[in-house]
Image (cartoon, grey):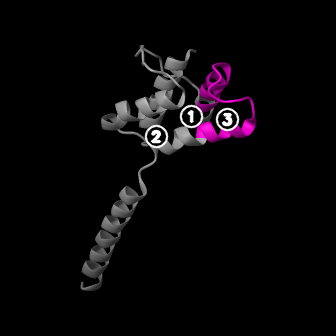
Amino acid sequence: MDVYSNIQQLLYKAMLSGMLCKEDEVYVRNKILALLGLQDFYEIEVEPAEKDISDLLDELSDYAVETKVIGHFIEERDILSAKMMVIFLPKPSELNRFFLKNMSKTRNEQRIISTK
């Protein structure tokens, strides 16, 4: 598989697992392209692969080594994989908002139950 197929598969797997929503796909794809030193993206039709996210990250790291974006050291590969995964995570402020919102819902539900 080429690098564009791997990126497309990674995005697909991330959407299936709930790590990515459709609205953020272009943003996340562009961040991955930048990490890999790519300027353009060529969207291609890909069949869902049996590879898991870690396999796809390994293949993207292989590409980065081949194109000299990173060196051959395992630490550089791990750092690149971590940087790609961070792109899928919400920002700390978003996590805090989500937590506080759900915490207040839970407290309200507990109050309703305790008053019955």
Question: Residue placed farthest to the bottom in the image?
Answer: 115
Circle 3 or circle 1, nearest the eye: 3
Front residue of 86/40: it is 40
- Count numbered badges in the picture: 3
Which label was assigned to residue 17?
2
Q: Amino acid at mark 1?
A: Ile
Which label was assigned to residue 77?
3
Lower position in the chain sequence, tag 2 or tag 3: 2
Circle 2 or circle 3, nearest the eye: 3
- Mark 3 is surrounded, within 10 Å at the Cα level, by few (under 14), some (14 to 19) or many (20 or more) other residues, namely many
Q: Identify which residue is drawn at 63% across, 30% down.
A: 55
Is residue 116 found left or right of 20 in the rendered image? left
Magenta-drawn segment: 57-81
Lower position in the chain sequence, tag 3 or tag 1: 1
Look at the numbered disc 2 and give the secondary structure of its residue.
Answer: loop
Is residue 102 shown in magenta? no
In this rendering, is residue 87 above or below 41?
below
Task: From the top left corner, tell me how far across and down residue 26 is, in percent.
Answer: 36, 30
Q: Which residue is label 1 attached to? A: 53
Front residue of 37/26: it is 37
**What's the CA distance linking mark 3 and mark 1?**
15 Å
Circle 1 or circle 2, nearest the eye: 1
Look at the numbered disc 1 and give the secondary structure of its residue.
Answer: helix
